[in-house]
Amino acid sequence: MTETADFGIAWDWEYDADFVSLLAASCGRRGLSTVLIGPPDLAAVAPAVLGGARRFRAFLDRASDTTSAFEPVARAALEAGSLFVNHPLAARRAVNKAAMHLEFLSGGINVPYTIILPVYEKDPTAQIFKFDGVGVPFIVKPAHGGGGDGVLLGARSIADVMAARRDYLDDQILIQENIVPRILDGRPAYFRVYYAAGDVRACWWNPRAHLSERVAPEEMDRHGLREIERIAVRIHEISGLRFFSTEIAVTADGRFISVDYVNEPCDMRLQSRARDGVPDGVVADVCEALARFVRSAIGGRPSAEIEGGEQDRDRDRRAEGEAGVPPVDTA
């Protein structure tokens, strides 16, 4: 006999506990059943999922990219037809900053002037650029990685670039111009933006201090910031992700520039628990948006009868094909 839950949530980061608990509560208010699969639960849940005794109509994977023990569970859920909030192939593609830079450019999103250097191990003698167009200081970052890992904000020399290439031998390196935001009400116009199934929430963001504050609706209107919402929706269309964060700056001449393309999975620590976390109200809004999405997508019916679920899965497959994403390895 197969037991089917509405929503499976896999997580492996201890600081995700508050977020997944709030998300489960939002789902519960909509009559959705949830199964939380954290590290303590994996040994008990995995055999049932792998054996087909446990299925999920929808699935959120915040674990398999960092903990290999979760990979079989995520793969089994995918093969069983679960509707993933973020399809694993789309997520894998979106974390490549070099690929996203090019896709944003072609998709009509402003991005910093950037030079992409090849993997060091493939081309250690790649021509190092002159700083024309990039300026000094500039930013150096690996194409893969999150949480600011490997990002050098005040690079000034070829030596800084070469050090990054040697530190990340098997990754491309991005050299970006340093975007200077305009000042609005005494604060830099630099924003961390959360997209959750059509819902967009923007926060004032200090990239050096890692502190954020929710942008009030009246501030969005007073400062003409609604373009942020359009950009977030466009990123969703390009990446195929339904849940992510991004960073957007507004320059002195009024340009909206995506300076850090896609964060997936994104940090959802509560600010009440961690000073550099996400404002609690934003986390709550994200949870409500995701719960609404799951409720709408599955309609409370068996996955084979989900209205819109197959269309969403077809959309994922089309996006993967158009982007040249390889098929899922089911071996």
Image (spheres, helix red, strand yellow):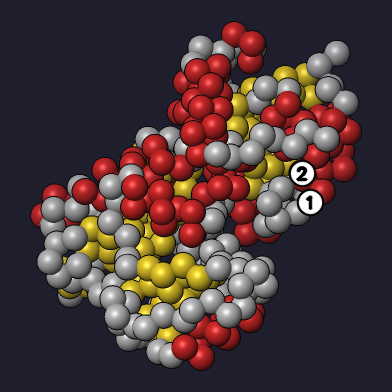
- For mark 1, give the secondary structure: helix
**Residue 237 visible somewhere in the drawing:** yes
Q: Residues within 10 Å of mark 1 (few under 14, many from 20)?
A: few
Q: Provide residue 51's location: percent of width, then percent of height.
A: 88, 26
Q: Quadrant of the C terminus?
A: top right
Q: Is residue 202 left or right of 117 when viewed as pictured?
A: left
Foreground pick, 18 / 52? 52
- Identified by mark 1, the residue type is Ser
Identity of the residue drawn at 81% across and 16% down: 2
Q: Position of residue 183 (x, y in %)?
A: 17, 72
The residue at the far top in this view is 305
Residue 214 visible in the shown view: no
Neighbours of disc 2 within 10 Å: few (<14), some (14-19), many (20+):
some
Residue under the image location 79 percent in, 24 percent down? 54
Q: CA distance from mark 1 to mark 2?
A: 5 Å
- Tag 1 near tag 2, CB within 8 Å: yes
The residue identified by callout 2 is 71
Secondary structure, mark 2, is helix
Quadrant position of residue 310: top right
- Residue type, numbered disc 2: Glu
| Residue depicted at x 54% and y 56% | 96
Q: Is residue 268 above or below residue 328?
A: below
State which quadrant residue 260 falls in.
Answer: bottom left
In the image, residue 268 sits, relative to residue 196, either above or below, namely: below
Q: Which sits in the foreground, 129 or 152?
A: 129
- Left or right, 194 with reference to 230: right
Mark 1 = which residue? 68
Q: Is residue 15 above or below residue 198?
A: below
**Image: 67 above or below 188:** above
Image-based side of 314 in relation to 304, left or right: left
